[in-house]
Image (tube, grey):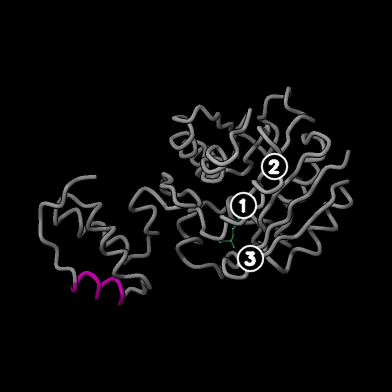
Amino acid sequence: MAPTVFTPDRPALVRRLRAAGCVFAEDEAELLIAAADSAEALTHLVDRRVAGLPLEHLLGWAEFCGRRVVVHPGVFVPRGRTALLVDAAVAVAGPAPAALDLCCGSGAAALVLHDRLAPRWLAAADVDPVAVACARSNLDPLGVPVYQGDLFEPVPPVWRGRLDLVVANAPYVPSGAVATMPPEARLYEAPVALDGGVDGLAVLRRVAVGAVEWLAPGGHLAVEVSAGQVEVLCGVMTDAGLVPTVVRDDDLEATVVTARRPG
Ligand code: GLN
């Protein structure tokens, strides 16, 4: 990071950020100051933040499960709540699993799974080429491949029926609710990362059906969803031949469903 060679007016900066609705104005001010190498650069960053760009897109990274994840403009910003998805996936995974992060976005989940699982094979995939490029910048250094394509379609066929773990933070916002999301998501994240169709479960239905085919017997799917969608999703998973379990964390406001392929 560039050294700060100028003296920013911290109180004025905090006031400006607060007036623009930034709840953690002090923290954001420090992060933006650290990211700027001149007063002009800082002003440019703050102007864009005040105009509504997500902090993470301006910084170029987000913190996720204690790690720095590179986040390119337009890419879904990893959410704090998705720590539950990673925890739940780690809890159900056996030793040295073959694991896949579907709908990987920035690749944040795969990045953490790489450290916490010691997988014998790990890959990520996303339909959005912008997300794939971002995920590659996070995962290339770890030797984790990132495939571009629709769900399981780009995954090497040798892994069909042999995966121990499939993790997916698929889009699950009902189409009609995308308009009510905060502008940072609605305007600056790819709609394909948010919009889950009429009831929000269009992609997760296809993930469940695909998982039955791609998981090894005894393997697990782990997905994030909203609390109100759990009942329908569990029905979908059961119909697909999986055995679902719901995991909830009220502090994180997070809901995860893990689903085991019997056998
Ligand atoms: N409600 C979720 C969020 O903004 C949407 C995430 C998703 O669709 N995967 O955190």
Name the quadrant containing residue 215. top right
* Residue 98 % position (x, y): 68, 32
Give neighbour class at mark 2: few <14, some 14-19, many 20+ (Cα, 10 Å). Answer: many
Give neighbour class at mark 3: few <14, some 14-19, many 20+ (Cα, 10 Å). Answer: few
Residue indicated by mark 3 = 249
Give neighbour class at mark 1: few <14, some 14-19, many 20+ (Cα, 10 Å). Answer: some
Asked whether residue 71 appears in the rendered view, the answer is no
Residue indicated by mark 1 = 87
Q: Which mark is residue 93?
A: 2
Residue type highlighted by circle 3: Asp
Residue type highlighted by circle 2: Ala
Residue located 45% across and 62% down the image:
184
Magenta run includes residue 158: no
Residue 151 or 115: which is nearer the viewer? 115
Name the quadrant containing residue 194. bottom right
Q: Earlier in the sequence, mark 3 or mark 1?
A: 1
Asked whether residue 140 appears in the rendered view, the answer is yes
**Which secondary structure lies at badge 3?**
strand
**Cα gap from disc 3 to disc 1, whole angstroms:** 11 Å
Over which residues does the magenta segment extend? 11-18
Residue located 45% across and 49% down the image:
74
Helix, strand or loop for the magenta stretch, by majority: helix
Left of 99 or right of it: where is 184? left
- Position of 24 relative to 245 (above/below): below
Residue 86 or 188: which is nearer the viewer? 86
Q: Earlier in the sequence, mark 2 or mark 3?
A: 2
The N terminus: image quadrant: top left
